[in-house]
Image (cartoon, rainbow, N blue to C red):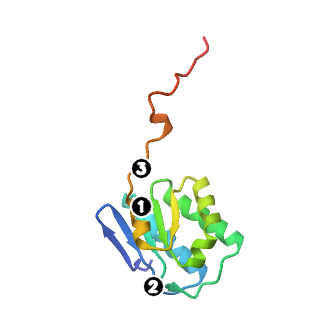
Amino acid sequence: MKKLEHFERKPGYAVFFPVGEFSFDELAHLISRAVVRCRRQKIGKLLIISTGASGFHSAGIAEQYNFAEQIAADAASLVKIAHVASPEWVRSGDFRVMVAGNRGLELENFNAESAALEWLLRPAKMSCSADKSASPRINPI
């Protein structure tokens, strides 16, 4: 398989910035490969900057669903993703974010790299289950 170009490892995260003309399926495949690389190399955070990619059409609902589902499966809840994209992609991305989130992927779309990086590098919030003040479970005898 061809080397994944435009992938850089940074302290605490990785950056993938595809550049060129791609079909939607080609771009989805490249993003999938970047996510898999992060998971395999135990890189828990990925910044995708796709503003240098062009040529792909607006995806239909089925393509968006399949893309979000594939990326969530690739990440296996181990990779948090911030995606800097065109305004059109960001506007239409709520559905993809929802589908991916329902499958355990922490994903957000952004117009600006600075906002994406701030969100990506923000420490994780404590979950409710870690709260010791929760009421104890009652077990039947």
Tags 2 and 1 in contact by the CB under 8 Å rule? no
Q: What distance separates the C-alpha of mark 2 from that of mark 1?
A: 22 Å
* Residue at 59% in and 59% down: 100
Residue occupied by mark 3: 124
Secondary structure of residue under mark 3 = loop
**From the viewer's perspective, is 34 left or right of 104?**
left
Q: Quote the CA–CA distance across marks 3 and 2.
A: 30 Å
Q: Nearer the viewer, residue 118 or 104?
A: 118
The spot of residue 129 in percent (x, y) is 49, 35
Determine which residue is flagged by label 1: 120
Q: Nearer the viewer, mark 3 or mark 2?
A: 3
Looking at the image, which is closer to me, 2 or 121?
Answer: 121
Question: Which quarter of the rendered picture does the C terminus lie within?
Answer: top right
| Left or right for 85, reference 41 | right
Q: Amino acid at mark 2?
A: Val
Left or right: 16 in relation to 30? left
* Pair 2/1: label in front: 1
Which badge, 3 or 2, comes first in the chain's sequence? 2
- Residue 27 numbered tag: none
Mark 2 or mark 1: name the one nearer the start of the chain: 2
Residue drawn 48% across and 81% down?
51
Which numbered disc covers residue 19? 2
Please tell me how crowded label 3 is: few (under 14), some (14-19), or many (20+) other residues with Cα within 10 Å: few
**Residue drawn at (36%, 67%), measured in percent from left and top?**
14
Local secondary structure at mark 2: loop
